[in-house]
Amino acid sequence: MHEMALMESVLEIVEDEARRAGATRVTVVRLAVGVLSHVDPEALRFCFEAVTNGTTAAGARLEIDRVAGAGWCLDCSTTVALDERFGDCPQCGGRRVQMTAGDDLRVAELEVV
């Protein structure tokens, strides 16, 4: 399960940012997770509980915002919605679509005290 390694990295970022802010506790972690990222939000939730135990983020609420997939079609020069990686352009049917959004995972926001 690669979500555990991802969440360990997220926790490092969260703790570093909390420390920089002079916070003693993290209350909310908001992640932006692309629908094309091959990351399971429920697995992230499970891993979050496991990795935050005993840290400044213990007991924090995890919020996950899903980011839609998008791409740029080189054939029709259009930004299009993507439901799958390497999908055909829904406008022209072309196969030369470069993904521009929806494959990321990032810490979008923290609430700390």
Image: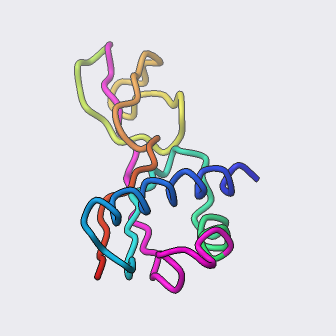
Question: Residue 85: image x %, image y %?
Answer: 54, 34
* Residue drawn at point x = 45 percent, y = 49 percent: 105
Instruction: Please name the residue shown 32% across and 13% down the image.
Output: 75
**113, above or below 85, in the image:** below
Q: Nearer the viewer, residue 66 or 5?
A: 5
62 part of magenta stretch: yes
Residue at the right extreme of this rendering: 1
The answer to whether residue 65 is magenta is yes
In the picture, the quarter occupied by the C terminus is bottom left
Q: Is residue 36 above or below residue 88?
A: below
Residue ID at (40%, 71%): 29
8 over 104 or under it: above or below: below
> In this picture, which residue range is highlighted in magenta?
50-74
Q: Residue at x 50, y 55 (%)?
A: 12
* Image spot of residue 13 (x, y percent): 43, 54
| Position of residue 5 in the picture relative to residue 113 (left or right) | right
